[in-house]
Amino acid sequence: AQKVTQAQTEISVVEKEDVTLDCVYETRDTTYYLFWYKQPPSGELVFLIRRNSFDEQNEISGRYSWNFQKSTSSFNFTITASQVVDSAVYFCALRGSQGNLIFGKGTKLSVKP
Amino acid sequence: EAGVAQSPRYKIIEKRQSVAFWCNPISGHATLYWYQQILGQGPKLLIQFQNNGVVDDSQLPKDRFSAERLKGVDSTLKIQPAKLEDSAVYLCASSLWARGTEAFFGQGTRLTVV
């Protein structure tokens, strides 16, 4: 069975702080894909990043960075120097061999000025 | 490139009534998904199409929910009869293929059943 766990329900930080959102996954597939999505108050899910199971290189995109560790089945997301516009619900998702996309319950991030 | 289009954006119905949602995926995307997102939760997959065939509908309440994807493009999701617990946002998404590509989401339809 596939599962995605986001243990942090809500996080509140002050602008310019760094924040890390945790994601732990479970799968028996050897080939799988991991994703992060952002859901702002407007409601639309916005794709942020995709990672396949064979690529453990960490990735940085501007203030965003992702740390993928197969040994601990984790795919964590860090926002550096957070901004108010980063306030949203962030979802981690897993796609396995059958192609279905399973989401975690999300972490609500509030960035206060 | 146009995104995933959904309509209506909002719908309020009484319990036991029926409702239908429409989705037009990104052009050329073979895979289409319908998700249900209850307030405060992550999206739950209801059904996944590959072209016009169903790949996964294991979590679709088939006694009241139905979905089709005509000609492998547009899709409709229907609920008949609706229950109070069906109040949620219904999200449509599409991806180029089912495996390694990301899914792009529409703005969703917020359904309130009263």
Image (cartoon, coloured by chain):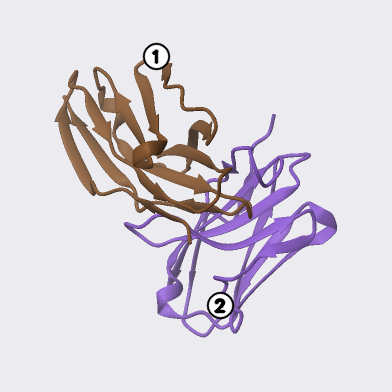
Chain colours: A brown, B purple
**What is the three-letter code of the residue carrying label 1?**
Gly
- In the displayed structure, B43 sits above or below A108; it is below
- In the displayed structure, B1 sits above or below B92; it is above
Are discs 1 and 2 located on one and the same chain? no
> On what subunit does the disc labeled 1 rest?
A
Q: Which percent across, then down, holds residue A31? A: 58, 43
**What is the three-letter code of the residue carrying label 2?**
Pro
Residue B92 numbered mark, or none: none
Disc 2 designates what residue?
B61
Residue A62 numbered mark, or none: 1
Answer with the quarter of the image where residue B29 lies: top right
Q: Which percent across, then down, holds residue A42? A: 41, 42
Determine if residue B66 is in view: yes
CA–CA distance between discs 1 and 2? 42 Å
Q: How many marks overall?
A: 2
Is residue A44 or residue A80 the one in the foreground?
Answer: A80
Residue at figure coordinates x 35%, y 53% from the top left: A105
Is residue A28 or residue A99 the one in the foreground?
Answer: A28
